[in-house]
Image (cartoon, rainbow, N blue to C red):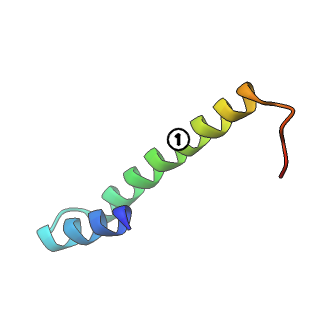
Amino acid sequence: GGPLAVGFVASAVGLEGGAFVLSAFGIGAALILALLVQETRVSPLSDTG
């Protein structure tokens, strides 16, 4: 629970938890998309579902 820990810490400290969660979610989504694109480029024929 990294994101959850970050959100908890942000709320405890009094920062804008919403912005923190959104930024963390955006970064995570970008990383996941990058990994998916890399796998697709490396092995486009090994789609085992």
Residue lying at 28% horizontally and 63% vertically, measured from the top left: 6
Query: What quarter of the picture does the N terminus occupy?
Result: bottom left
Tag 1, which secondary structure? helix
- Number of numbered discs visible in the structure rendering: 1
Q: Is residue 42 above or below residue 23?
A: above
Q: Where is residue 23 drawn, in percent x and y?
A: 38, 50
In the shown orientation, is residue 45 left or right of residue 26? right
Q: Is residue 27 above or below residue 2?
A: above
Residue lying at 24% horizontally and 62% vertically, measured from the top left: 16
- The quadrant in which residue 36 appears is top right
Q: Where is residue 2 drawn, in percent x and y?
A: 35, 62
In the shown orientation, is residue 36 left or right of residue 9? right
Q: Nearer the viewer, residue 23 or 46?
A: 46
Label 1: how many Cα within 10 Å (few below 14, some 14–19, many 20+): few
Q: Where is residue 14 drawn, in percent x and y?
A: 14, 68
Q: Is residue 32 above or below residue 42?
A: below
Identify the amino acid type marked 1: Ala
Q: Nearer the viewer, residue 39 or 3?
A: 39
Residue at the extreme top of the image, as rendered: 41
Residue lying at 69% horizontally and 34% vertically, measured from the top left: 39
Q: Is residue 15 above or below residue 37?
A: below
- The quadrant in which residue 45 appears is top right
Q: Where is residue 34 drawn, in percent x and y?
A: 58, 35
Q: Nearer the viewer, residue 37 or 42?
A: 42
Q: Which residue is mark 1?
A: 30
In the shown orientation, is residue 2 left or right of residue 45? left
In the shown orientation, is residue 19 left or right of residue 38? left
